[in-house]
Image (cartoon, rainbow, N blue to C red):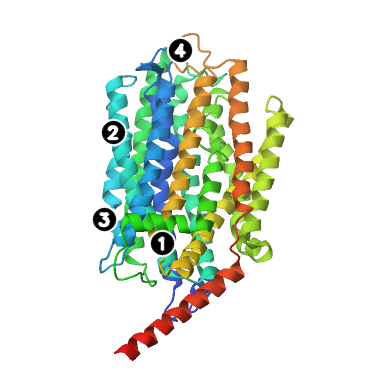
């Protein structure tokens, strides 16, 4: 066994050739997640900005029906993503009913790689005309289809982790590394794209203020259209092989019942899983905790700081804390348990955001303090990305212990539901703040936002995040699963299966 393989066994807590999860599979699983995050991040972070600033729905004179273009975009993002989230339990049930020679989760990585790539590119179609109702309807239809296609690959991908192993420690390590890799993939997109858009549109801006010259507003918008499209093209082309690699090199070991359950039966199981419901409520209440790293943060960088690249810095500042937290999750769960580690990191996040809210940003020392705050805010972000998945994995074992059925498809669908509602809330608050702050990207005088509007944007983004940090803590206070209890449940499940096997043999 080579040094690298030995290191990977140590990282994942696996045993060589014992018939259980091996590092090669774990790495392949992470690679698929890396590619998946290229696609979900380009849509989640930039489709809204593509609509408001490249297609100019954020302009003061653009209306879609009886609402402003910006609010129409906000409602589209909120409605589509909530619709998408509500589809997750249905997809989870479909996963639980899937029976193929490849398993029930893996096949979707193979089947959906090309469809999700095509739909992503159609969302950033650079040939459409900006600011028209027809284009808005086109984007709305394509985005809804994209959301359905993405659900079909996202739900089984995360459910796959529970089918690869039922060892809570190994599964926790698997998810820790995978979420770390996923964060890296998302980070490349969130950091790289604003730098590229800044470079491409620099010639349309005043070199002293960094704002778009009034005479170049439409040239700037057209350049943004093509830049976002090319970025989406590059990321999807790179991501597709990663889906196939994940499909080819993973294995499902934990088998489900012979008879596939119905959707109605699965929904009943879902509501019997008390611990999972608490995690779901927590995730929904925490939907706005990272709003500053979504669309709202880019609007703040573009219109208040006058430089898209500042958004790259905002997201980069979060990375160190997130990386440290991700690496420390195994230690934190051992020291405090998953439940209390989750609570502690979000208490820290709430305190930091309230401090940032009251301090503000209108002086150099305040910006430095906020930069330190962003580093600290990476801690709850990095830890949450891992802890919530690991806790849901434990609730799958809890459900099997309680009912005899695992239903990992619909259980992990709740994680994707939480993620999508979080993205929906984040996008809505971002565009709502954009509209409420009075931003007008086609202002003839070149004043795209007032000083009062800048303060409004800051207040809405930071305060919503702080309150969301508090909200996400409350349900977890009532969460009862511990590592010790989970291990005991897995042991009892194994004993029941062994006893059932012996009874079946006796009957024969």
Residue at 44% in and 73% down: 22
Q: Which residue is mark 3?
A: 111
- Distance between mark 3 and mark 1 Cα atoms: 20 Å
The answer to whether 222 appears left or right of 443 in the picture is left
Q: Quadrant of residue 374?
A: top right
Q: Which residue is mark 4?
A: 214
Q: Is residue 171 above or below residue 305?
A: below
Q: Residues within 10 Å of mark 2 (few under 14, many from 20)?
A: few
Q: Quadrant of residue 406?
A: bottom left
Q: Is residue 241 above or below residue 315?
A: below
Image coordinates for residue 188, horizontal then vertical, percent: 48, 45
Closer to the N terminus: mark 3 or mark 1? 3
The furthest residue to the top: 445
Closer to the N terminus: mark 4 or mark 1? 4
Image coordinates for residue 295, horizontal then vertical, percent: 49, 33
The answer to whether 243 appears left or right of 185 in the picture is left
Q: Which residue is mark 2?
A: 141
Of discs 4 and 2, which sits in the foreground? 2
Residue at 34% in and 47% down: 150
Closer to the N terminus: mark 4 or mark 3? 3
- Distance between mark 4 and mark 2 Cα atoms: 32 Å
Of discs 3 and 2, which sits in the foreground? 2
- Distance between mark 4 and mark 1 Cα atoms: 54 Å
Q: Which residue is mark 1?
A: 408
The answer to whether 204 appears left or right of 286 in the picture is left
Residue at 27% in and 22% down: 134
Image coordinates for residue 342, horizontal then vertical, percent: 62, 54
Q: What secondary structure is marked by label 1? A: helix
Q: What secondary structure is marked by label 4? A: helix
Closer to the N terminus: mark 3 or mark 2? 3
Disc assigned to residue 225: none
């Amino acid at each position: 066994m080579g040094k690298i393989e030995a290191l990977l066994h140590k990282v994942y807590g696996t045993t060589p050739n014992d018939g259980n999860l091996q590092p090669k599979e774990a790495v392949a699983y992470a690679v698929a997640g890396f590619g998946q995050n290229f696609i979900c991040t380009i849509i989640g972070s930039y489709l809204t900005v593509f609509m408001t600033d490249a297609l100019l729905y954020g302009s003061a004179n653009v209306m879609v029906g009886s609402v402003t273009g910006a609010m129409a975009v906000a409602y589209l993002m909120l409605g589509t993503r909530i619709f998408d989230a509500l589809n997750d339990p249905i997809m989870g049930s479909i996963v639980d009913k899937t029976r193929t020679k490849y398993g029930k989760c893996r096949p979707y990585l193979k089947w959906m790689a090309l469809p999700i790539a095509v739909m992503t590119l159609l969302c950033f179609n650079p040939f459409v005309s900006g600011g028209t109702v027809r284009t808005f309807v086109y984007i709305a239809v394509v985005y809804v289809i994209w959301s359905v296609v993405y659900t079909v690959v996202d739900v089984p991908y995360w459910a796959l982790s529970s089918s690869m192993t039922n060892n809570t420690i190994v599964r926790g390590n698997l998810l820790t590394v995978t979420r770390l890799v996923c964060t890296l993939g998302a980070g490349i997109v969130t950091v790289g794209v604003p730098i590229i858009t800044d470079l491409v549109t620099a010639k349309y801006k005043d070199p002293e203020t960094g704002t778009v010259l009034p005479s170049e507003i439409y040239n700037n918008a057209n350049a943004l259209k093509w830049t976002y499209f090319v970025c989406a093209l590059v990321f999807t082309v790179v991501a597709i092989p990663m889906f196939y690699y994940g499909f080819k090199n993973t294995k499902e070991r934990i088998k489900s019942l012979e008879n596939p359950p119905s959707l109605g039966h699965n929904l009943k199981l879902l509501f019997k899983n008390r611990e999972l419901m608490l995690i779901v409520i927590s995730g929904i209440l925490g939907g706005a905790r990272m709003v500053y790293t979504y669309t709202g943060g880019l609007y703040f960088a573009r219109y208040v700081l006058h430089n898209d690249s500042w958004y790259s810095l905002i997201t980069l500042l979060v990375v160190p804390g997130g990386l440290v937290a991700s690496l420390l999750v195994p230690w934190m769960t051992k020291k405090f348990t998953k439940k209390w580690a989750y609570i502690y990191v979000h208490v820290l996040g709430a305190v930091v955001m309230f401090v940032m809210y009251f301090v503000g940003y209108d002086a150099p020392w305040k910006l430095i303090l906020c930069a330190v705050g962003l580093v600290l805010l990476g801690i709850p972000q990095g830890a949450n990305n891992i802890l919530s998945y690991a806790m849901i994995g434990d609730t799958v074992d809890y459900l099997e212990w309680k009912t005899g059925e695992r239903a990992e498809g619909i259980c992990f669908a709740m994680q994707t539901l939480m993620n999508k509602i979080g993205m929906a809330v984040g996008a809505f608050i971002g565009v709502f703040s954009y509209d409420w702050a009075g931003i007008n990207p086609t202002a003839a005088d070149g004043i795209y936002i007032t000083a009062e509007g800048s303060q409004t944007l800051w207040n809405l983004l930071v305060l919503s995040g702080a309150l969301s940090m508090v909200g996400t803590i409350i349900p977890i206070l009532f969460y009862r699963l511990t590592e010790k209890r989970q291990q005991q449940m897995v042991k009892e499940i194994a004993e029941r299966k062994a006893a059932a096997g012996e009874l079946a043999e006796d009957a024969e």
